[in-house]
Image: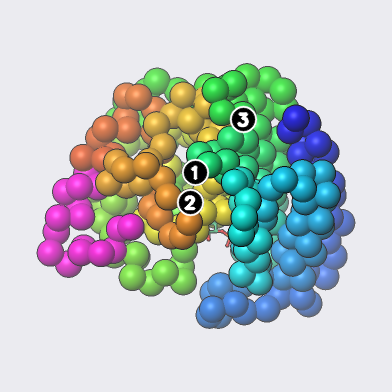
Amino acid sequence: MYQQIETIVKEAGRIILGAHHIERSVEEKTSACDLVTAYDTAVQEYLRKALLTAYPQFGFYGEENDCCETEGKCGWFIVDPIDGTANFIRKLHHSCVSIGLLVEGKMEYGAVYNPYFDELFTAQRGKGAFLNGERIHVTDVAMNESMLLFGSAIYYRETIPATLRFVEELFPQTLDFRRGGSAALDLCYVAAGRADVYFECCIRPWDYAAGSLIAQEAGAIVTALDGSPLRFADRCSVAAGNPKNYAQLIELSKKIAAEPDMKGRIL
Ligand code: IPD
Ligand code: CA
């Protein structure tokens, strides 16, 4: 049933690979560090038309232009046309197309495609996670052997102190940290065992919808940073780890959230 999504997400990837003079099409969204390009909009428009033609029973919720067509539908695609827009602009080749399908409040299907490496991560609820058709699994290392990935949207200034507290506390307790710039790929990298933990204090659903299911289906525990289920309607924090390191992340998160100047800084 979801086979067509794989074709559609790869076609969207071809638009990204064909991008040229990206710098000429950059615009500011909410601030000088919240950027969008003509390609973000073009990829989203392609995805909206292609997905709604192939699956007219579902709605569409995409990052660009406040695109929300979900009324009267029991399920909708949650789409980030380019996750890792700053990477895309700087030609860092670490960006992806992310398509999640939410049905009756639960993630049903996810596809994350990095066109630069031709890597397609997919998962259907209850059926495992895959990279280019091969089954993937999380690692089983403890926190002291874990490679951590994290994000922090630079435009959500209020979350910066909490993010830095996590890094300060965890840095000496882990193997190392990386900051990739694409939450969807961060979650897929945890799924594939390329990293062991991912966290972010405040992020929008299109960045984690597909990746959260892919990570879960690969054996990760994925929740908000207070341990509650992820919310897909608006902003939320995200915590993802394997069964050996997840509890330590949540414990630390609760400790940081209780600090007087951290109130309301972790969603
Ligand atoms: C961003 C990336 C980044 C994360 C931010 C997101 P965008 O998405 O996923 O890693 O830290 O919170 O907003 O803007 O590149 O689509
Ligand atoms: Ca984006």
Q: Does the residue at mark 3 contact the one at mark 1 (Cβ under 8 Å)? A: no
CA gap, disc 3 and disc 2: 17 Å
Q: Position of residue 164 (x, y in %)?
A: 31, 58
Q: Earlier in the sequence, mark 1 or mark 2?
A: 1
The region drawn magenta spans 252-267
Near-viewer residue (148 or 239): 239
Residue at (62%, 35%) from the top-left corner?
109
- Between residue 144 and residue 68, name the one nearer to us: 68
Label pair 1/2, CB-CB below 8 angstroms: yes
The residue beneath circle 1 is 105
Q: Amino acid at mark 2?
A: Phe
Q: Quadrant of the N terminus?
A: top right
Badge 3: how crowded within 10 Å, few (<14), some, or many (20+)?
Answer: many
Mark 1 residue's CB less than 8 Å from ligand 1:
no
What residue sits right under mark 3 in the picture?
123
Query: What amino acid is at disc 1?
Result: Gly
Give the residue pinned by disc 2: 232
Mark 3 and mark 1: Cα distance apart in space? 17 Å
Q: Secondary structure under badge 2?
A: loop
Can residue 80 be seen at all in this image of the molecule? Answer: no
N-terminal-most mark, 3 or 1? 1
Q: Are marks 3 and 2 in contact (CB under 8 Å)?
A: no
